[in-house]
Amino acid sequence: MGAALRTEFRKVVTTRLWWVLLLAMVPYMAFLAALMAWLLTQDGAMAGGTGMGGQTGGEEVTLAADAVVRGAYTIAVSFGYVFPLLIGALSVASEFRHQTITPTLLAEPRRSVVVGAKLVTGTGTGLVFGVVATAGAVAAAATVLVALGEQTFLDQASTWGTLALSALALALWAFIGVGLGAVLPHQVAVVVVVLAFTQFVEPLLRLGLAFTSWGAGLAKFLPGAAGEAVSGGSFYSETGAMDLLDPWQGVLVMLAYGLVFAAVGRYTTFRRDIT
Amino acid sequence: MRAVDDLSFEVHPGRVTGFLGPNGAGKTTTLRMLLGLVRPTSGTATIGGLAYHQIPRPLRTVGAALEAASFHPGRTALDHLRTYAPQVGVPDARAAEVLEVVGLSGAAGRRVGGFSLGMRQRLGLATTLLGDPQVLLLDEPANGLDPEGIRWLREFLRTLAAQGRTVLVSSHVLSEVEQTVDDVVIIARGRLVHASTLAELARRARPHVRVASPDTAGLAALVERAGWTRADDARADRGVELVDVDAAAVGAAAFAAGLELHELSTRDPGLEGLFLELVGGPAAGAADTATGTTRGAAA
């Protein structure tokens, strides 16, 4: 397994995809975080209504820690998870696209080991994405807050705990991505499905389900909601549109998605003849 | 779909074996079964007695380059080799070594996407050599090589066999590997049609003189007297087939002996002709299960 992990790691770092995706993700997340930080400091801010105190008319707005931390610092968990999801999915799909699956299975014919190594390596790559994107979001948002003379809440331990969970949530997205890639190894198909689901289907589903009494319970278990639960809240939950699972439940739900996908992929895609 | 049916042959160390057959004969499928990439419906494929997935660190035992030489276009040649080095269990320096061996050192840092087919073949070959394996399975390695490349490949494969390795080279053209191989295994429509040394095949490809006479006994006596060699693969319809003699000599001897001839003809298929004859033979029986028993003898 050690050798398989080293090989998988080298597959990631010897191609350009990882830094191209990271280069797209980090500025995007930093921009959104800065934007959110600015919005939250504006009078009558949309978020964190419950947490705000000492607000009088057009005077100083005192920010709630939750609003800043969840709304701006961990914005990548709500809007950036498509990137680790893609890096995970493509780690499998690109092998079929370029037929490198043949040398891969010649080097390691035990196919479960190949899938396992990809899950671990993909999650590790996702963690790097999570750490860097969260750091980027924090740097941008904190800069805006400092410039506006607001509190950054970076002196609070709970903030850092949430930031770590944000990185974990993004790592788990890559884990799910590897599983998804194993189920759907066609590169174009998996990219289309990932984009359609993350950018369109899940947001609509979550909004739609929130309007029904039975749906709200179900919506918590959608992968996007589970991801936000891991980091303990989000843009969506801050706006009051959602209630979420506990962080540990979120972790379990995400792991379950990844493992179920990976198992299905192992017994479909990775069971077939490689021709 | 039946691709390979009841195919059984052995390849030996220290020799280059040509695995021949027309396109679609089942060569690639056979190799992929041997490598555990395709599962035979029944039967076994083993290398040195082990199924591929049972071999610990298989790339140290078997190096295989399959026809669809598969590389990520964005990866450099050196990185491609280094990617697999941990699983082969060799240090990274080995990657540069094998590039040197196949003459690709100059392109080590270039992305494979810009490689010619010939360079990809060489890189595929380099990949098989990473683990310094005793068994090499090469699917159409001469495809895309220029004449100089083909000559290089020929000498390269001879060297590998001379080191005591088992080398199996597939091709759909006999002439392409004629000067490289010691043994030939010929398949058609998923079935074995011929397996022997190349020398044996060449012997069968010598010109045959067919001679027929109404005086069967007289003809037999003449053959006996002249000391001609009968072809051991003669067609048993009529007359006799002789080798190592030309039609003119047979005609002259018959004339001198006063023997009446009804036929005197030369059949000279050549090696390529014999190959085409073998692979174009009568269609094999219609079985619809894929079975395969393939053994690679490892040294």
Image: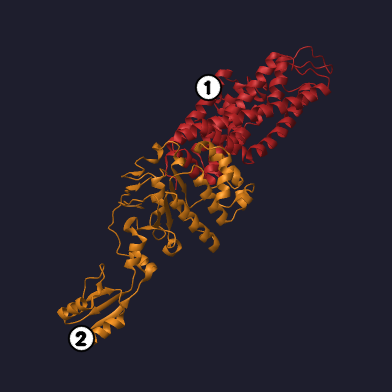
Chain colours: A red, B orange
- Which labelled disc corresponds to residue B257? 2
Q: Position of residue A158 (x, y in %)?
A: 68, 14
What SS does tag 1 mark?
A: helix
- Which labelled disc corresponds to residue B192? none
Give the left or right position of residue B4, taking residue A176 as reference. left
Report the residue at 42% width, 49% height from top: B164
Q: Distance between the residues labelled 1 and 2?
A: 99 Å
Residue A249: name its quadrant.
Answer: top right
Instruction: State the residue lying farthest toward the top.
Output: A54
What SS does tag 2 mark?
A: helix
Nearest to viewer (mark 1 / mark 2): 2
Give the left or right position of residue B203, taking residue B219 as reference. right
Can residue B174 be spotted in the picture? yes
Category of crowding for the residue at label 2, using alpha-carbon neighbours closer than 10 angstroms: few (below 14), some (14–19), many (at least 20): few
Q: Which of A230 and A174 is in front in this view?
A: A174
Category of crowding for the residue at label 1, using alpha-carbon neighbours closer than 10 angstroms: few (below 14), some (14–19), many (at least 20): some
Chain on which label 2 sits: B
Q: Nearer the viewer, residue A257 or B296?
A: B296
Q: Position of residue B263 (x, y in %)?
A: 25, 82
Residue B197: name its quadrant.
Answer: bottom left
Q: Where is residue B86 in the image (x, y as percent from the top left)?
A: 53, 36
Chain on which label 1 sits: A
Residue type (three-letter) at the residue carrying disc 1: Leu
Residue type (three-letter) at the residue carrying disc 2: Ala
Can residue A261 be spotted in the picture? no
B36 over B252 or under it: above or below: above
| Residue on which disc 1 sits | A252
Instruction: State the residue lying farthest toward the left.
Output: B217
Q: Where is residue A128 in the image (x, y as percent from the top left)?
A: 64, 29
Give the left or right position of residue B232, taking residue A119 as reference. left
